[in-house]
Image (cartoon, rainbow, N blue to C red):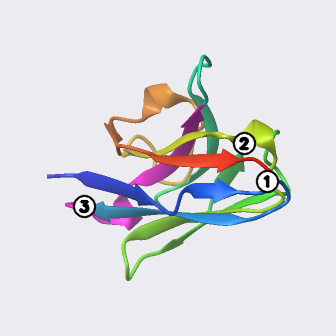
Amino acid sequence: QLQLVESGGGLVQPGGSLRLSCAASGFALDSYGIGWFRQAPGKEREGVSCISASGGSTNYADSVKGRFTISRDIAKNTVYLQMDSLAPADTARYYCAATSAVFSLCFLAQIHYNDWGQGTQVTVSS
């Protein structure tokens, strides 16, 4: 059974950093693309970043480009989201999701993703 478990969220001051982890089980990361999404209270869930199954393609939302970095460790079957220069606007619940739609590309649109984790809360506040 495919399972995704997020961790690494917490409370951080503006300008700080966090690294989120998405641990996958029941499937191999080199067969699935992984996306990170977030949802703030009262707002729709939005795509933040993704990495393709091949590992050769990544995408970022304009709002996080230059501040967030997605990576993965195949041996640990885990995808990471390094978040730097965090701002209050980054406060949200962050989710990772998996897709087998395309091997060499990844997409920030939720429609491509079938399996989701439970999320981890990130709060940026002084």
Residue farthest left in this picture: 1
Given the image, on which type of amino acid does mark 3 rest?
Phe
Which label belongs to residue 86? 1
Q: Residue 41 is drawn in which quadrant?
A: top right
The residue carrying mark 3 is 27
Q: Residue furthest bottom?
A: 75
Rendered position, 101 above or below 7: above
Residue found 51% across the figure and 63% down from its top: 8
Can residue 89 be spotted in the picture? yes
Q: Residue furthest front?
A: 126
Q: x and y percent of residue 58 in the render?
A: 65, 55
| Residue 31 within the magenta-colored segment of the rendering | yes
Name the residue tied to disc 2. Answer: 90
Q: Bounds of the magenta span? A: 25-39
**Going from the N terminus, do you reach mark 3 or mark 2 first?**
3
Indicate the position of residue 21 as horizontal and vertical percent values.
Answer: 48, 64
x then y, percent, for residue 37? 55, 39
Q: Residue at x 77, y 37 (%)?
A: 89
Q: CA distance from mark 3 to mark 2?
A: 30 Å
Labels 2 and 1 touching (C-beta < 8 A): yes
Q: Mark 3 or mark 2, which is nearer to you?
A: 2
Give the label, 1 or 3, closer to the camera: 1
Q: Which label was assigned to residue 68?
A: none
59 drawn magenta: no
Is label 1 in a helix, a strand or a loop?
loop
Up/down of 122 relative to 42, above or below:
below
Q: How many numbered marks are there?
A: 3
Residue 63: x %, y % from top left? 81, 39
What's the amino acid at mark 2?
Asp
Label 1: few (<14), some or many (≥20) within 10 Å? many
Q: Answer yes or no: is residue 61 visible.
A: no
